[in-house]
Amino acid sequence: MKLLTILITACCVVGSAFAQASPNLGNLKDLQEALQNVRNSKSRSGQFNVCEVARRSEARPAVETKLPVALQPPPRQAGAGKESVELDSALLAIGCERLKDALLFELGTGDAWRGHVDVVINSSLPEGAEPFLIVTLRRDGWEYELEVPKKAKPDRLLRSLVHVLLLEMANRNSTSESAEVPLWLVEGMTAHIRAFNLPTFLVQEKVTMLGNRIKLDALDVVREHLRHDPALSFQSLSWPDSEQVGGRSAGIYRDSAQLLIYELLHLKRGRAELHEMILALPTHKNWQLTFMTAFHPHFQKLLDVEKWWALTCVSFAGNQAIEKWSTTETRKRLQDLLDVPVEVHLTADRMPAAAEITLQEVIQRWDQAAETQALDRTLSGLQLLRWHGAPELDKIVVGYITTLQKYLRDRDRGLKVFRGPEAARLADLKTDVSRQLDKLDAQREGLAKQQAKN
C-alpha cells in the first residue's frame, strides 16, 4: 500500500504529457511500466516541462496549431543541418531557458511568461521528424505542447521553440483565438538568434564549447548571398508563395527575413516596437495592421515600408553595386522630381500642352488626394536619389525629404481636428511648408552657382 501511494504521487508530478503517453493504469504492473517509460525535467523558470516518453498514444486533442510552413534547406546549404542530435530531457530544459534568455535580450524585455510549455520527446518518432505543436486554451490561460523526436535536427528544433516562445508572448492578451505569428518573424528571429548568439542553447553531453574558437558569422554570410540573389520585397516576405519557401528560394527567404529582423531591431526604439507588435498580434485579424500600429513612428503606410526596405537592401548589398551619378546629373534629376508635370488647356479647340508646376503650387492648390499622390511620387524619387546622387547634394536632398515627410505627418494629424474656424490652421501649415521649400530652392540655386564658379 505504501509503494502504491509513492507511485501515484510520482505519477502526478509527471503531468499532462505523461497522462497522454501512459497505457491503461488498471493495475500496479502497468503503472510501474509507465513510470519506466517517462523522464520529466522542469526548467529554471518553471515555464518548460520536458517529458521523455518511449511511446505515445495515437490519439491527439482536437485543437492544434500548425507551425508556419517549414522551409526546406536550400541547395547552397546542402550538407548543413543534416546531422541529428540525441535529446535529453534535463539538458533540453536548460537549452529552452537559454533560448528564451536570448530572445528576451533581443527584444529588450524581461521574462513575464504566462503559458506553460510541455516539450514531449517521443522516442517512437522517426529521426529528424518535424515537431508537432498543440495549443490549448483553458480556464487559466493558454497551454502549449511541442512533440519532438528523440533524434532531432537542431535547426528544426530551434525554429519550433522560437515559434512557441513568440506565440506564447502573443497569446498573453488573447482570450479566444490563437494569434497569427507571421512566417518572416519566425524565420527571421530564428536566424538572427542563431547568428548573433553563441550556439550553445542546445546543450549536449560530451560536447565542450571553446569560447575562443567560436566565430559568429552575423550578417557576413547573408550579405554575400544577397549580392548574388536580390532580397525579397516586403510584400513577398509577407505573403510568400510555394516557390519562395521551397528549394533555392527558401535560402533567399531566410536571408531576407534575417536582414529584416536585424534592421527593425536597429530602428530607434525598434526592439520595444517589435515587442509591442508581438504582444498586440491578437488585436487584429491581419498582422499587417498590428505591424503598422507598432512601427507608426517610422512608417505611415505600407508603401513607406516597401520604400524603406528596398533602400535598405540596396545599401546592405554593398555600395559597389550602386551606380553613382555626377553632380550635374544629380542636379538635373532633383529638378525633375521637384517639378510636377501637368496638362494645361489653353483653349477648348486645342490639345492640352505639357507643363510643370512647383511643389509649393501643388500644396496650395490641389485637393488632398492629388496632393498626396504627387508628394509620394516626389518622396519616393528623393529616397532613391540619396543612394545614387552626388554627395555634394545629399544635405539638400535630405532637407526636402524631412520637410515633406513632416508636412504630410502634420497634415494627416491636423485633418482630424481642422474643422470650421480651425481650417485656418491647415492654411498656416501649407504656408509654412511652402516657405521652407522656398528656402531649400534658394540653397540649391546658391550651391549650383558656387559650383559653377569653381
Image (cartoon, rainbow, N blue to C red):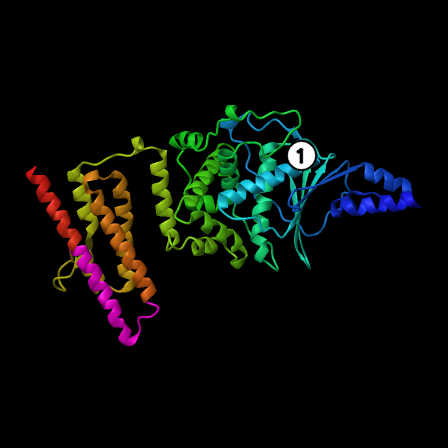
Percent x, y for residue 385? 25, 43
Q: Secondary structure at mark 1?
A: helix
The quarter of the picture where residue 351 lies is bottom left
- Local crowd size for mark 1, using a 10 Å CA cut-off: few (<14), some (14–19), many (≥20): some
Quadrant of residue 362 in the image?
A: bottom left
Q: List x then y, in percent, for residue 279.
A: 53, 54
Q: Is residue 249 visible?
A: yes
Q: Is residue 209 left or right of residue 59?
A: left
Q: Position of residue 379 (x, y in %)?
A: 27, 50
Amino acid on which disc 1 is placed:
Leu
**Figure check: 296 above or below 117:** below
Give left or right: position of 182 versus 340: right
Image position of 266 with respect to 280: above or below = above
Tag 1 residue: 91
What's the residue at 70%, 36% (across, down)?
A: 89
- Residue extending furthest toward the left: 453
Q: Indicate yes or no whether the magenta region holds residue 93.
A: no
In the figure, is residue 292 to the left or right of 182? left
Magenta stretch secondary structure, dominant: helix
Query: Going 12% across and 62% down the picture, which residue do you hit?
Result: 346
Q: How many marks?
A: 1
Q: Residue drawn at (43%, 46%), measured in percent from left and top?
A: 235
Where residue 427 sits, quadrant-wise, is bottom left
Is 210 placed left or right of 86 in the picture? left
Return the residue nearer the eye: 65 or 102: 102
**Residue farthest toward the bottom in the current orientation of the protein:** 421
Residue 138 image offset from top left, x and y in percent: 69, 57
> In this rendering, does residue 390 appear at all?
no
Magenta run includes residue 420 = yes
Q: Pick the residue in front: 197 or 21.
A: 197
Rendered residue at 65%/42% (across/down): 44
* Highlighted magenta segment, given as a residue range: 415-438
